[in-house]
Amino acid sequence: MNRRDFLFAALVTPIVSNVASADEYRSNFVEVFGVSNRAEVERECDAIIFRLCDRYGTPKNWVKFPVVFTGGGRGYAGCTYYQKPRVVRVEICQPFASARGGTLDHEITHAFFFYLLNNSFSLFFNEGVAQNSEYNQRERLRSTVYRRASNGEFVPLTSLVNRSSYDGALLVYHQGFSVVDFLIARGGSAWLYEFLDDLTNGTQDLNECLKRFYGYSSFSDFETDWWNYVDGGQNRAGVEPLIKKVVK
């Protein structure tokens, strides 16, 4: 049984199966509001969730939550609200056509990881993972990273990794995206999940987790490697792959 089938079997009883028409489609994982093409949007939300399962693993628990398209005017593109043990709602402040492959994927990723890790986790890595899911924006984000790094706008990672609030310069987003991009290049998405799970629910020590999962003897060594990745053009194929070891 693949992860997609497992997610259907383990988490919910399908509300509609083998539907004959796209207009009859009902998601088992989200309920969409604020759009006329609800079935299409719910199908897209499910596709995002399936992609995340294939990349990172399957959540053990899931509570269906609303995805509300608000029509904009709130000063942000989207937001995800949690109240443990569940996601309360996802807000998307863009039209579906604009949010697809960008904000919609970003916010669904926040919700997915809340259930995957059974917890909220590091703001820096949370935004980095969510940014990485924006497949329509990935190359633009890499260009932004290179430009900002070249212009001297980036700050030492030590000033970002433990933040519990956003910075006004979007560094949590851009440097977070780049660090996650680099870690995926080194060990893959599933290995990144193992790292984040240990950081959130296990060791809870970033230096120790970087050593155990990526072999860095110090945070400065890790940061130097990441800077080399940025300076070298952020080419994932050019990153030396990790020789993985059993660390748990």
Image (spheres, helix red, strand yellow):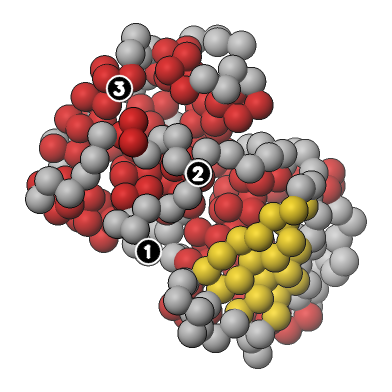
Distance from Cα at disc 1 to Cα at disc 2: 28 Å
- Check disc 1 and give the amino acid type: Asn
Residue 127 x %, y %: 46, 49
Q: Callout 2 environment at 10 Å: few (<14), some (14 to 19), or many (20+)?
A: few
Figure check: 68 above or below 28? below
Residue 179 x %, y %: 34, 37
Q: Report if residue 147 is visible in the image.
A: yes
Asked if residue 204 lies left or right of residue 243, the reply is right
The answer to which quarter of the image holds residue 230 is top left
Dot 1 or dot 3: first in sequence order is 1
Q: Badge 1 is on which residue?
A: 136
Asked if residue 43 lies left or right of residue 210, the reply is right
Mark identifier at residue 222: 3
- Check disc 2 and give the amino acid type: Ser
Q: Name the residue at the bottom extreme.
A: 36
Q: Nearer the viewer, residue 175 or 193?
A: 175
Figure check: 60 above or below 166? above
Figure check: 15 above or below 2? below
Query: Secondary structure beneath disc 1?
Result: loop
